[in-house]
Amino acid sequence: MTRTRPADSAQASAAPLWTAAALAAGLVALIVAGALSGLGTADQISDPGAVTRWGLPVARFTHHLAMAVAVSAALLAAVAVPHGRGDKRRRRRSRTHDADAAEAPDQHPLYLKALQIAGASAVVWTLAALAVLVLSYSALAGQPLSPDEGFTQGLVGFVASIPTGQAWAAMVVISAVFTTLIVAVRAPGGVFVLSLFGLTGIIPMALVGHSASGDDHTAAVNSLALHLLGMIVWVGGLIVLALLSPEIRRQAAAATTAAESRLVGMVLSRYSTIAGLAIAVVAGSGVVNAALRIEAWSQLVTTAYGTLILLKAFATLALGMIGWMHRSWIIPRLTADDPGPGYRRITGLLWQLVLVEAAVMSAVVALSAILGRTSPPVSEDLPPDATPARILTGYDLPPAPELSTYFTLWRPDWLWIALCVFLAAWYLYATVQVRRRGIRWPIMRAVSWLFGLLGLFWVTSGGPAVYGVVLFSGHMIQHMTLTMVIPIFLVMAAPVTLALRFLPVRADASRGAREWILWLVHSRWSKIVTHPLFAAANFAGSILLFYFTPIFGLALRYHIGHELMMVHFLLTGYIFALVLIGDDPLPKRPAYPIRLLMLLATMAFHAFTAIALTNMEVLIEASWFGNMGHDYGFSAVEDQRSGSEMMWGLGEIPAMLMAVIAAIQWSRDDTREMRRTDREAERTGDAELHEYNEMFAQMAERDSRR
């Protein structure tokens, strides 16, 4: 057992001060960048005052940091640090043999410390979001902060009718709910769900600002959402590590086992994996977003917006180099079985690099706050000669639809592209690793997975995405491909089974990806959504609710509604296919007759809905499809009839395919059961059959005696 030296205690107690100093570097960067961008210059027309001009970027800087720390602290508590003191069996024995241990908390001090950091940061997050809301109205209205009734009424109108006000009001609600729950929730499952809820704060931030207007709205919003996701996990996670460093040092110094002594390396290694993915997302999405806001390379040096982007790019490269040092040099030494005499020196260097990273990241967040207040070179105003389609969808009309244009027109949706690339790379890597271990994994499953992801890429970024917002038929192709075709290929690849065979088992009292997958598979929510009745009702009822309620209109008019629509269709189809033909583990899998009955019932309902839509003479969402102003040679009602027919055809063919697959699986299961029975009979010499015949012989003998 290693004793903590006084020098170590002094360094540990000074860590929060050094962390605060590193974060203060962001304020310095904010002041310098604000001065260079002209933030201190008063507006001659409507100046809200110096308090608003400087207070708004400071409030945004504080908000971004606090949100990142709060969400990342909850996320790291759920996936990176031990939840309890040792394994469950040891804790159970300690309760049995030690009465005092029964009263001691089971949760690990590092886990509790992370939750404390999340709670304190969440309070700052809520207050900062409220400050940004008020200061944003002051800046937009050109009015200084005032307690007057006119200012208050204007603020209420700002929240009620202006998208920016609505977005920041939603952020206040999200942060307040997160703050309330993070204080009460202590179970790892609840903390994990709460961290995902906190990440929804990305949505209102991505929907306002420069990405909310201008060309290619979809690419701008989704790339910004990815950028914010990467920054929150990356920046927030590193700051949380810096704040956790005193507790990590204490726990490692008081370790009684070799595994506990490597706590520093273990936590850093898990964060490094998450940070590696985050930095790739930040860099890629940053390039995409900058390309949408800048027209020429010269604008990177001739405009304030371009200069800020260059500074962010250089800082990101520097942070990437430091992260590479962590991954390639420091982490292997900290996780080694025998760290050697230089362990303490390496640990000290580690925390010094972490503080440097925190300072640079704080400066990057400050640059982002100023960037949000700086006009980009590309105009964000709608052109005066905008067509009706441009006004409604944000894009000009595509050419007349033909079979070829569905495969030659592209509009990249970077959110789905990033998801497809990640899932494809993970599946291929996992397949190679599993096969190297000698575990059999069919190549055709990988082919099925890649084909499904290729279809997902096409339907979200290809012709269906282009025509899906203009024509009802294009939307129906997108809908039916998402919910009926793609899920078949994804389910047949059995990704959950592959993950359980590939992912390592955590040796400590924490939950990794494998543990969370098992938790989800056996959760009450999984039992509900995979129940045959729910899966069938959800699959069939979603179509009815979507097209015969205002939900369809919301999905057409609002970006978040459109993305949620695609997520819902994909998950609904995936769960339905998983229950019918999947090989992945489920809480309870229905018998084959029940599966075929489900399929027949949903096919009938699907056909009935398609026929009802085909016979409708009233245009669904007439204010949208009826006002596109296209001249494709057919009316909107005729296009709706064509789309309804496509719904029938694209729905019934995959359903028949699933019926065939289920029948083949049924036959194979029966064959395997017969072979198992035959092997059992050979092993026991048909003992079961002899017992069965002897039972009938005894019954016949008793009957003859009577």
Image: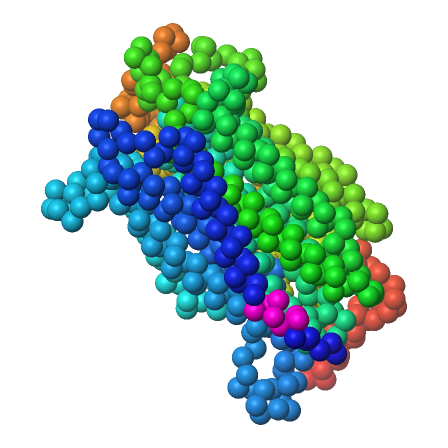
- At x 40% / y 15%, what residue is drawn? 396
Q: Does the rendering let one see residue 170?
A: no
- At x 43% / y 63%, what residue is drawn? 119
Q: Camera-side residue: 101 or 547?
A: 101
- At x 45% / y 36%, what residue is drawn? 33
Magenta stretch contains residue 642: no
Quadrant holding the N terminus? bottom right
Place of residue 335 in the rendered image (x, y in percent of width and height, measured from the top left):
76, 60
Place of residue 141 in the rendered image (x, y in percent of width and height, measured from the top left):
22, 35
Residue 197, relative to residue 616: is it above or below?
below
Residue 439, relative to residue 545: is it above or below?
below
User: For residue 40, which quarter of the picture?
Assistant: top left
- At x 31% / y 27%, what residue is drawn? 620
Residue 248, relative to residue 516: is it above or below?
below
Q: Camera-side residue: 605 or 257?
A: 257
Place of residue 544 in the rendered image (x, y in percent of width and height, measured from the top left):
36, 38
Quadrant holding the C terminus? bottom right
Residue 229, relative to residue 635: is it above or below?
below
Magenta range: 7-13
